[in-house]
């Protein structure tokens, strides 16, 4: 352990030997193995003359054998590469704002939505195009798409159950656009159905219930001033539910499958999928309008055709903020986080024995902006991406409304509400897509809109690598279930599959020298600043980072952390708890 923590720049990972998944430590382990073998041979040679010492030598060799077995497991373990390797690349239609490159849960197909409404299915192993589909236009309407894709993997235990994928398109002509939901079979990509036209512009990505029977989405009409929440029956696809809010448009919805309960008033004992969404913000507005949050669950005991389903949409409460993205939901459906106006965040954190964090109440976790921020984006706009929870849900990661990306500590005490910034980096452009966290909570992958991808230590923000894309990037990207591949697209339609983790023999570059002649130099320009107040899950290391890799895109300069304080910017309208006018 002393060798690991002394010689490896990733020493913050090494709380207990043997440290896994680090290419530098694999090199160290190989060397230690060689030393132990030599020591074992030398010990046997020196002590074999005496029966007493032979017994000692045998015991020592048994001990060494056990140690050698343990370190051999480290060598056999997958490691994170110093640079990712490209497995394949493919050309499709441009992938833009709101689109997604999404690997299916079974790992067979990489689905890509494009700005012209085309859905492309790529073989996940080779990148070959398996299918493309673009719905036929309606009359002279122009088809566009700012949707990702949702995938229902099917249930083998249910007879005639069908796996499928859905996304939405917008049919634009003049001032009255409409939207349609498109479903294709998985993995074949053949058309299953297209919904009837829905009023307005689809927001976010349609979401599927856990049993695959229903699809829900939000869309906004009347020049995107009226919000709609609509449910479709999968196999018809007739409209199941239509809820309209004439006060404000809606941002896209998020779904959490099989929650412990509906964590809001009147949601007790309802374990049906929960949908959450909020009022959206116009990025051109230099004001903060009144907003609200909403929840929906299919009622317990509901049968198809029962009346009153619209009453299951719950107006949770009015809020002094708006959002442009779905929330992150975790903790068995009892926690959620929104990116909100003024470049801030709001969260609700609940548990089995408490009601303080219920979603209809005031947020019990927040990150507020510094008062009198200079930038209009900081004074009014929400970040453009959905926050992401680490796998242990003690940290939240998100891009900001300015050129920053933040790692935030979730409050752990009942008397705390303020989220604290653990580390923060400055980027050269906005982070529009949600981050991706590795399965073992070691690294977080971040993409910025100028087309740069970062692999950052989750606990410290120290850079493992950066890689450029061939064009700007503003869509969602994904990681496979095995946790070793990333799938990313750009605005020119280039889709790449990068392997970032694997066996040491598959590493793309030679391992660094084990015994450097001097202590490696630090990289101040790439080191994020870390606040002294919060205590992260793993204490940040002060060990210097590795030498920067040469990249065609200049590495960004990381800025200082600013711990926000309470904002004094009031909303333009007075907060009210009264229910808005609904039809």
Image: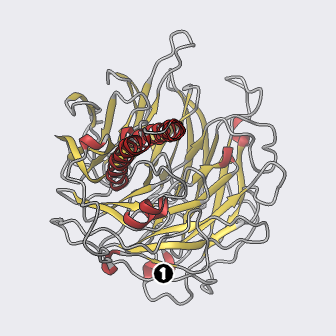
Residue 101, image x and y in percent?
Answer: 33, 43
Q: Residue at x 48, y 52 (%)?
A: 221
Residue 130, image x and y in percent?
Answer: 23, 26
Is 353 displayed left or right of 77 in the figure?
A: right
Q: Which residue is mark 1?
A: 561
Q: Is residue 205 visible?
A: yes
Q: Nearer the viewer, residue 44 or 90?
A: 44
Residue 296, image x and y in percent?
Answer: 67, 43
> Is 30 above or below relative to 195?
below
Q: Is residue 286 visible?
A: no
Q: Residue at x 67, y 53 (%)?
A: 335
Q: Nearer the viewer, residue 101 or 548?
A: 548
Is 104 displayed left or right of 245 in the figure?
A: left
Is 141 displayed left or right of 184 in the figure?
A: left
> Is 265 above or below relative to 3?
above
Residue 448, image x and y in percent?
Answer: 32, 64
> Is 97 above or below relative to 239?
below
Count of numbered tags: 1
| Mark 1, other Cα within 10 Å: few <14 / some 14–19 / many ≥20 | some
Q: Nearer the viewer, residue 361 or 348?
A: 348
Residue furthest top as drawn? 159
Q: Which secondary structure, mark 1?
A: loop
Q: Nearer the viewer, residue 528 or 299?
A: 528
């Amino acid at each position: 352990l002393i060798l690991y923590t002394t010689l490896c720049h990733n020493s913050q990972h090494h709380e207990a030997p043997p440290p896994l998944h680090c290419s530098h430590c694999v090199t160290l382990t190989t060397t230690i193995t060689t030393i132990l073998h030599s020591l074992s041979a030398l010990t046997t040679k020196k002590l074999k003359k005496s029966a007493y010492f032979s017994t000692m030598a045998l015991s020592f060799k048994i001990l060494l054998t056990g140690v050698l077995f343990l370190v051999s497991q480290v060598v056999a373990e997958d490691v994170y590469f110093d640079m990712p390797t490209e497995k394949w690349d493919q050309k499709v239609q441009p992938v833009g704002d709101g689109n997604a490159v999404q690997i299916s849960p079974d790992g067979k197909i990489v689905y890509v939505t494009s700005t012209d409404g085309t859905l492309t299915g790529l073989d996940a192993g080779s990148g070959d195009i398996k299918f493309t589909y673009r719905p036929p236009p309606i009359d002279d309407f122009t088809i566009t798409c700012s949707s990702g894709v949702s995938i229902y993997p099917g249930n083998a235990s249910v007879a005639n159950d069908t796996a499928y994928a859905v996304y939405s398109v917008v049919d634009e002509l003049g001032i009255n656009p409409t939207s349609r939901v498109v479903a294709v079979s998985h993995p074949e990509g053949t058309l299953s159905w297209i919904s009837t036209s829905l009023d307005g512009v689809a927001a976010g990505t349609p979401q599927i219930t856990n049993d695959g029977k229903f699809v829900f989405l939000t869309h906004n009409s009347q020049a995107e001033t009226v919000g709609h929440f609509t449910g479709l029956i999968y196999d018809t696809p007739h409209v199941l539910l239509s809820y309209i809010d004439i006060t404000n448009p809606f941002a896209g919805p998020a779904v959490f499958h099989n929650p412990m309960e509906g964590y809001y008033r009147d949601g007790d004992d309802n374990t049906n999928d929960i949908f959450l969404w909020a009022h959206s913000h116009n990025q051109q507005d230099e004001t903060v309008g009144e907003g609200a949050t909403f929840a929906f669950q299919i009622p317990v005991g509901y049968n198809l055709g029962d009346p009153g389903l619209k009453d299951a949409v719950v107006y949770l409460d009015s809020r002094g903020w708006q959002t442009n993205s779905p929330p992150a939901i975790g903790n068995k459906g009892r926690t959620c986080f929104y990116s909100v106006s003024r470049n801030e965040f709001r969260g609700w954190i609940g548990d089995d024995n408490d009601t303080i964090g219920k979603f209809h109440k005031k947020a019990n976790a927040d990150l507020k902006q510094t008062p009198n921020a200079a930038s209009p984006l900081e004074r009014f706009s929400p970040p453009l991406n959905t926050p992401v929870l680490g796998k242990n849900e003690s940290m939240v990661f998100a891009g900001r409304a300015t050129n920053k990306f933040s790692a935030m500590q979730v409050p752990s005490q009942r008397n705390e509400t303020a989220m604290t910034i653990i580390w923060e980096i400055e980027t050269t452009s906005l982070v529009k897509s949600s981050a991706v966290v590795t399965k073992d909570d070691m690294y977080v992958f971040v993409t910025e809109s100028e087309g740069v991808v970062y692999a950052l230590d989750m606990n410290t923000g120290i850079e493992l690598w950066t890689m450029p894309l061939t064009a700007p990037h503003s869509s969602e990207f994904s990681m496979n279930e095995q946790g070793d591949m990333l799938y990313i697209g750009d605005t020119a339609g280039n889709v790449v599959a990068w392997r970032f983790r694997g066996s040491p023999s598959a590493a793309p570059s030679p391992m660094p020298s084990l015994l450097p002649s001097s202590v490696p130099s630090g990289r101040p320009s790439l080191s994020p600043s870390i606040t002294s107040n919060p205590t992260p899950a793993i204490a940040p290391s002060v060990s210097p980072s590795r030498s920067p890799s040469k990249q065609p895109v200049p590495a960004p300069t990381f800025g200082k952390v600013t711990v926000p304080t309470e904002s004094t910017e009031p909303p333009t309208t007075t907060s009210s708890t009264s229910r808005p006018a609904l039809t």
